[in-house]
Image (spheres, grey):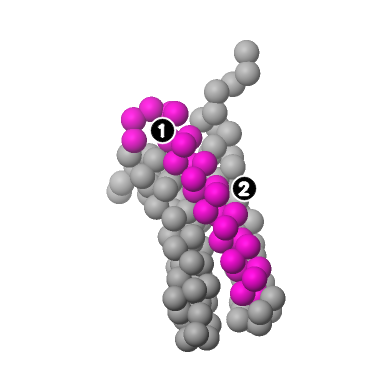
């Protein structure tokens, strides 16, 4: 098992990415190179940056990659909301995606805070 695979934040981000890929398969073909592609890239980036950050040396580098991951998670959140509001994500699918998105955010922020320098 690789080190990043032990992190709950990565596990949830990976599950979220899988869910996003599956859900976006149903989106209109006209969105394939626009919203679908951008949403998938953001979903991929969350877990990928956690994995890459863990492989770097030092807490500062890990924090930098977690910060990028948090930005991707925020982008993903908006992309999914837009897709939902456009009618691409049915309520049933949204009710499964939203908790995963929220859990990913909680775990990622918790990991980020846990390695951040403590005030003196």
Pointer 1 and pointer 2: residues touching (CB < 8 Å)?
Answer: no
Residues under labels 1 and 2: Cα distance? 20 Å
User: Magenta stretch containing residue 63, yes or no?
Assistant: yes
Residue 41 visible, this orientation: yes
How many marks do you count on the picture? 2
Residue name at image x 31 percent, y 46 percent:
2
Quadrant containing the C terminus is top right
User: In this rendering, is residue 84 above or below 58?
Assistant: below
- In the visual, does 59 lie left or right of 84? left
Q: Which mark is residue 61?
A: 1
Classed neighbour count for the residue bearing mark 1: other residues with Cα under 10 Å, few (<14), some (14–19), many (≥20)? some
Residue name at image x 44 percent, y 63 percent:
41
**For mark 2, what is the residue?**
106
Residue name at image x 42 percent, y 48 percent:
49
**Secondary structure of the residue carrying numbered label 1:** helix
Q: Nearer the viewer, residue 59 or 68?
A: 68
User: In this rendering, is residue 59 above or below 70?
Assistant: above
User: Residue 113: x percent and y percent?
Assistant: 58, 34
**Secondary structure of the residue carrying numbered label 2:** helix
Q: Which mark is residue 15?
A: none
User: Magenta stretch containing residue 115, yes or no?
Assistant: no
User: In this rendering, is residue 82 above or below 3?
Assistant: below
Nearest to the eye among marks 1 and 2: give it.
Answer: 1
User: Residue 68: x percent and y percent?
Assistant: 49, 45
Residue 9 visible, this orientation: no
Residue name at image x 34 percent, y 30 percent:
57
Write down the region rendered in magenta. Answer: 56-84
User: Residue 110: x percent and y percent?
Assistant: 58, 40
């Amino acid at each position: 098992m690789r080190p990043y695979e032990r992190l709950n934040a990565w596990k949830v981000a990976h599950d979220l990415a899988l869910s996003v890929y599956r859900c976006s398969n149903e989106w209109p073909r006209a969105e394939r190179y626009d919203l679908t592609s951008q949403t998938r890239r953001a979903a991929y980036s969350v877990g990928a940056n956690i994995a890459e950050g863990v492989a770097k040396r030092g807490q500062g580098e890990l924090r930098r990659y977690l910060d990028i991951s948090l930005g991707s998670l925020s982008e993903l959140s908006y992309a999914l909301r837009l897709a939902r509001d456009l009618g691409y994500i049915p309520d049933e699918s949204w009710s499964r995606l939203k908790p995963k998105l929220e859990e990913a955010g909680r775990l990622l922020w918790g990991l980020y805070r846990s390695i951040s320098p403590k005030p003196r």
